[in-house]
Amino acid sequence: MINKKEAFIIPIIIIIIALSLSLSLDFSDGWRLFFGTLLAVSIIVLSNIFVKKFIAYRLDSEIEMKIWEAGKYGFNKDKNSKKPFPIGAVLPVVSKIILFPFKSFVWMACLVFDIKPRVYRGAKRFGLYTFSDVTEYHVGLIAASGILINLILAVVGYLLGFQLFARLNVYYAFFNMLPISELDGNKIFFGSLIMWSFLAALILIGMLFAIFIV
């Protein structure tokens, strides 16, 4: 399910997020706290990815994870930078510098995905599929599945007493739900406004708990 390119970039992003979070954590316990944060981030990111890949598979599609890049400028679609800037690899560090007093609040939307239909999807012209192409609704479903698993993990983490883990899941879902660029939130927003509104409401409730209660 994970190709060579993904196997290279996913661990890098996980480490970048964990290091950014660690800039404001208390290291009185040495590196044990860092590795605990690294483990939490790994579970959060990998759960999001594998659930999306599973849903994509069920929809006879394939997704490939990549670092969120900023390569477009202006309103002309033809105006693309020859060397897109890996904004997803930089924002966690920049956000931590700007928001240093807010501890675990770090930009965590670093990965996006490309999607393509599997070879035999083109033969399906009945039932669930009316076209061989992947529709915006299907793309939205795939993106929403990742958000949903993070919200579920947040609840499980809270009930088990892992408050930092619960908070980070909410933050991860929050940043990825923003309807901008290639982020999951944009895919969900254009796939189904109702689905985006429902998940946004859940995340808003989760943010209130994460900030004021947890």
Image (cartoon, rainbow, N blue to C red):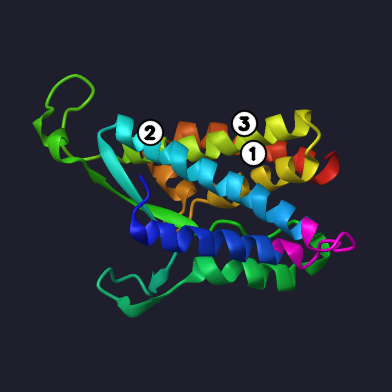
The region drawn magenta spans 21-32
Residue 177 picture location, percent across and down: 54, 47
Q: Disc 1 or 3, which lies upstream in sequence?
A: 3
Q: Answer yes or no: do the residues labelled 2 and 3 have beta carbons within 8 Å?
A: no
Magenta span main SS: loop
What residue would you read off at disc 3? 152
The numbered dot on residue 3 is none
Asked whether 154 falls inside the magenta stretch, the response is no
The amino acid sitting under disc 3 is: Ile
Please tell me which residue lies in front, 36 or 60. 36
Give the CA separation, mark 1 to mark 3: 11 Å
Q: Residues within 10 Å of mark 3 (few under 14, many from 20)?
A: some
Residue at image x 52%, y 46%? 46
Residue at image x 64%, y 34%? 153
Residue at image x 90%, y 62%? 28
**Residue 189 is drawn in which quadrant?**
top left
88 relative position to 92: left or right = left
Residue 75 picture location, percent across and down: 34, 70
The amino acid sitting under disc 2 is: Ile
Q: Residues within 10 Å of mark 1 (few under 14, many from 20)?
A: many
What residue would you read off at disc 1? 203
The amino acid sitting under disc 1 is: Ile
- Element type where label 2 sits in the image: helix
Residue 126 picture location, percent across and down: 14, 21
What residue would you read off at disc 2? 55
Furthest residue toward top: 127
Give the CA separation, mark 1 to mark 2: 21 Å
Furthest residue toward left: 123
Give the CA separation, mark 2 to mark 3: 16 Å
155 relative position to 75: left or right = right
Furthest residue toward right: 28
